[in-house]
Image: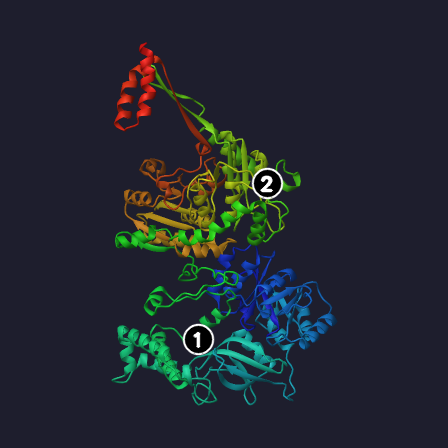
């Protein structure tokens, strides 16, 4: 083991982590799904160990471990829960003291332990081997790297912030940083008189390439250059391949259990490692490695009549042979037959692998990633094979079954943060439609997860709500609700934040008060027939305030102020609590300002259910408003269709989105900033740019600004994922741009075009429009006065954004005089008779008869 674990704040592997082959990544307020997706992409680049600022739930930790995290650094309490959930000891490192009786892969000491204590703990661990083999590791946090070598010598693996380290080793190039090579050397020992270390060189598949020697100097150079550098006993430093061209890329350095032997894992290029131009100094490659090499040669230069070449050229034949050999393997009976057919299947499978440019190492990495999974899959065969073979599905014990996280969307095509570009003139209709298509949502699958939660709260009340909050938010509450008046300490915020919120509230109130319909509509449709319409506030409303990857006090004011303006008597907020059981003080402050009666300390479908049906402590509401993820939306849709709930909702919702129309006069920095302000909401957000008559230079300038601004933002990892599936579409005319915009019906429509206000009449479908270069979407999100809770996913074609009217309903009345009834009565009677509703007809007739007496 290389006795260094560099600590970083991202999943990008720094140079100082190459030789150790591992890194400790600090995750702060993580979007677990996003981090998991990044882990999947980065798997194989290094071992990624994770430590969160605050403990996550067991399910969240398991999700990260499933995604490929080598281990998680957790509290003792979390370690106990994870071990009980089936997480292997080697994947758990306890921060601080290890709970008695719990096997873990290591402990992490952060409080400057004494050298003697580290040495004693390390020695005791060496005698307490894990059931699976190996000993726990003692990790020690080190603020001053100069203390590192002594701790390493005492048996520790030191955790040091990556920026404090360097791969350089010459004094004039250190720049105040500490050479990581010195930490490796502190762990090594040798009994050789020349002071050299025996070094085994292997490839990524762990096949031995040769046996060489290393010195302190060669190890330093290998780490500095990330190449194979060794010590020749006759010629001094040996830079492998410097003369022959058979170079090596260093993948990582390991030490054996005694620290007297070094192992280099390398990527070999050229003819091979040996000076005889063979791949290895030992025997030639066999098995899969030999087959892969042969197939790669055949792909490049096959001899005449080669069957392998025929397979490469005939996709249908290759497909048929793979399926044929798979069937023959299934039908094989004895050991000889099974091994024979398995070899045949592997041959044809490897032809497919090599043909597609995939290496066996990539296949092995994929297998390794599957080996990292903790969650169990149900593992049923696909339906066509179930039907073809007459398989009866086995019932899986739901208590033992762990649901495997859904496969995330495809990774971005490159590390560059750049929109996908398309020209409407040359693109097909299908390609343009794909740009404007929203990601598909599997409503039925989501409902399967949501319905048990909703029904649980409906029947289980407070007890179930508290249980679900502990499960999903990682905090156990005494009460699921915070009632007004709110304690001052719960809404303690800085003066500048308070001033910003107060201004936003004032502007939103001013705009929404102007919308309030206080007049009574009176129309006399016929002499003596007076019809009226007037509005009344909805009595009780529930406002959902998301938590997730960002704190959103703005949502609480954009929902709460219109409710207050409308005159709603009972305003209830719901928002997921933080890990300590409290709410964001900004949200509590807004709740106080809008006169909320209570705040439900819950998020997700469980919060929606609590407000829809009510619990012992949560009041039932008449209408639920507010954005949320797909689970919140599914829960809102369900309760609105449940007649026992008797609750309405504002609108369906999907991921946030923006469409920007720009022309050649638009400032690239402004355009990029508007795209990014939406992209940072989440990886499933969608941003679209319609560039009108812009040349390539202008488009390139936007791309350049987009990446430069994104890289400076803290949520760059989320942005990278979002931009990867977002597009820029070049069009010739404004008419075409607005036609496509209306087809898309965006949540946010930004017009960064000359004379922007003159084009507003062309807009038929949009949630909200931001007109001109100095109207960023951010202003609507916070302080301009318009509402930021808007229809998404194309619902702007038929829904309005939240407004004062969202919190009111209209009542109509009609008053008829004797004269009025006499005028319209005969028509009413005729229509009632036509419909066969005699009681309706009679209700008029008895009155007309009475009038004639």
Per the model, the C-alpha gap separating discs 2 and 1 is 58 Å
**Vertical placement of residue 393 versus 544, above or below:** below
Residue 776, visible in the rendered structure: no
- Looking at the rendered image, the disc whose residue lies closer to the viewer, 2 or 1, is 2
In the picture, measured across the screen, residue 323 lies left or right of residue 283, that is: left
From the top left corner, tell me how far across and down residue 700 is, in percent.
37, 54
In the picture, measured across the screen, residue 318 lies left or right of residue 281, that is: left
Which of 681/497 is in front? 681
Q: Quadrant of residue 256?
A: bottom right
Count neighbours of disc 1 (C-alpha within 10 A) and say few if under 14, some if 14 to 19, many if 20 or more. some
Please report the residue visible at 59 percent of the width from the left and 36 percent of the height from the top.
Answer: 592
From the top left corner, tell me how far across and down residue 287 is, in percent.
41, 84
Q: Quadrant of residue 524?
A: top left
In the picture, measured across the screen, residue 123 lies left or right of residue 534, that is: right
Q: What residue is shown with label 1?
A: 361
Give the number of the disc on residue 436.
Answer: none
From the top left corner, tell me how far across and down residue 625 is, in percent.
47, 39
**Vertical placement of residue 457 versus 406, above or below:** above
The disc, 2 or 1, on the residue closer to the chain's N-terminal end is 1
Please report the residue visible at 66 percent of the width from the left and 73 percent of the height from the top.
Answer: 152
Q: Secondary structure at mark 1?
A: helix
Q: What residue is shown with label 2?
A: 617
Q: Secondary structure at mark 2?
A: loop
From the top left corner, tell me how far across and down residue 60 is, in percent.
54, 58
Which of 496/766 is in front? 766
């Amino acid at each position: 083991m290389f006795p260094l674990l560099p600590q970083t704040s991202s999943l990008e592997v720094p140079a100082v982590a190459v030789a150790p082959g591992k890194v400790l990544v600090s995750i702060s307020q993580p979007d677990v799904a996003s981090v998991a997706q990044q882990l999947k992409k980065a798997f194989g680049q290094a071992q990624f160990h994770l430590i969160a600022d605050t403990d996550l739930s067991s399910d969240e930790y398991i999700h990260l471990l499933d995604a490929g995290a080598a281990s998680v650094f957790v509290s003792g309490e979390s370690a106990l829960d994870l071990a009980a959930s089936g997480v292997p000891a080697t994947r758990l490192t306890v921060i601080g003291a290890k709970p008695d009786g719990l096997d873990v892969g290591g402990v992490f000491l952060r409080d400057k332990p004494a050298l003697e204590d580290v040495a004693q703990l390390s020695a005791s661990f060496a005698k307490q081997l894990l059931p699976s083999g190996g000993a726990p590791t003692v990790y020690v946090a080190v603020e001053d790297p100069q203390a590192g070598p002594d701790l390493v010598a005492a048996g520790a693996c030191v955790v040091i912030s990556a920026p404090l380290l360097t791969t350089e080793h010459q004094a004039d190039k250190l720049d105040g940083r500490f050479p990581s090579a010195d930490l490796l050397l502190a762990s090594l020992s040798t009994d050789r008189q020349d002071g050299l270390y025996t070094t085994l060189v292997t490839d990524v598949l762990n096949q031995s390439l040769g046996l060489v020697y290393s010195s302190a100097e060669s190890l330093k150079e290998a780490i500095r250059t990330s190449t194979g550098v060794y010590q020749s006993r006759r010629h001094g430093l040996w830079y492998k391949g410097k003369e022959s061209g058979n170079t090596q890329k260093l993948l990582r350095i390991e030490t054996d259990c005694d620290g007297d032997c070094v192992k280099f894992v390398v990527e070999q290029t050229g003819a091979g490692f040996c000076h005889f131009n063979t791949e290895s100094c030992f025997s030639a490659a066999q098995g899969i490695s030999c087959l892969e090499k042969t197939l790669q040669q055949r792909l490049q230069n096959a001899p005449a009549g080669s069957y392998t070449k025929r397979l490469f050229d005939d996709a249908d034949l290759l497909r048929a042979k793979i399926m044929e050999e798979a069937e023959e393997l299934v039908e094989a009976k004895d050991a000889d037959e099974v091994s024979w057919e398995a070899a045949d299947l592997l041959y044809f499978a490897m032809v497919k692998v090599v043909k597609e440019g995939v290496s066996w190492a990539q296949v092995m990495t994929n297998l390794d990633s599957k080996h990292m999974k903790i969650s169990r899959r149900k593992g049923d065969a696909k339906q066509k094979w179930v039907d073809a073979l007459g398989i009866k599905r086995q019932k899986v014990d739901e208590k033992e079954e762990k649901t495997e996280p859904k496969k995330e969307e495809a990774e971005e095509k490159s590390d560059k943060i750049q929109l996908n570009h398309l020209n409407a003139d040359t693109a097909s209709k299908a390609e343009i439609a794909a740009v404007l298509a929203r990601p598909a949502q599997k409503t039925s699958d989501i409902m399967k997860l949501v319905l048990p939660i909703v029904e649980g709260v409906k029947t289980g009340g407070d007890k179930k709500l508290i249980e679900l909050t502990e499960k999903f938010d990682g905090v156990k509450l005494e009460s699921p609700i915070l009632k007004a008046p709110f304690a001052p300490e719960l809404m303690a915020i800085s003066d500048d934040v308070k001033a910003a919120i107060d201004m936003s509230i004032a502007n939103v109130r001013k705009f929404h008060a102007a919308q309030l319909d206080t007049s009574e509509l009176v129309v006399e449709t016929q002499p003596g027939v007076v019809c009226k319409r007037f509005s009344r506030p909805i009595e009780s409303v529930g406002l959902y305030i998301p938590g997730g990857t960002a704190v959103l006090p703005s949502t609480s004011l954009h929902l709460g102020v219109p409710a207050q303006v409308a005159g709603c008597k009972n305003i209830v907020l719901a928002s997921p609590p933080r890990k300590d059981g409290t709410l964001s003080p900004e949200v509590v402050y807004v709740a106080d300002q809008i006169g909320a009666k209570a705040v439900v300390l819950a998020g997700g479908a469980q919060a929606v259910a609590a407000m829809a049906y009510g619990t012992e402590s949560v009041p039932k509401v008449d209408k639920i408003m507010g954005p949320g993820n797909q689970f919140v939306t599914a829960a809102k849709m369900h309760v609105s269709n449940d007649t026992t709930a008797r609750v309405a909702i504002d609108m369906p919702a999907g991921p946030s989105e923006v469409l920007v129309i720009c022309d050649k006069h638009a400032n690239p920095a402004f355009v990029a900033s508007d795209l990014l302000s939406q992209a940072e909401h989440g990886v499933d957000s969608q941003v679209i740019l319609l560039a009108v008559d812009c040349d390539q230079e202008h488009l390139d300038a936007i791309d350049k600004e987009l990446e430069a601004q994104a890289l400076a933002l803290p949520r760059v990892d989320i942005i990278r994922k979002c931009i990867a599936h977002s597009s820029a579409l070049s069009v010739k005319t404004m008419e075409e741009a607005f036609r496509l915009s209306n087809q898309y019906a965006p949540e946010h429509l930004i017009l960064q075009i000359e004379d922007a206000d003159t084009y507003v009449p062309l807009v038929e479908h949009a949630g909200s429009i931001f007109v001109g270069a100095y109207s960023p979407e951010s202003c609507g999100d916070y302080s301009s006065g318009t509402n930021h809770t808007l229809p998404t996913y194309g619902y702007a074609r038929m829904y309005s954004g939240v407004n004062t009217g969202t919190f009111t309903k209209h009542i109509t009345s009609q008053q008829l005089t004797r004269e009025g009834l006499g005028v319209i009565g005969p028509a009413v009677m005729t229509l009632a008779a036509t419909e066969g509703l005699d009681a309706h007809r009679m209700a008029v007739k008895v009155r007309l008869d009475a009038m004639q007496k």
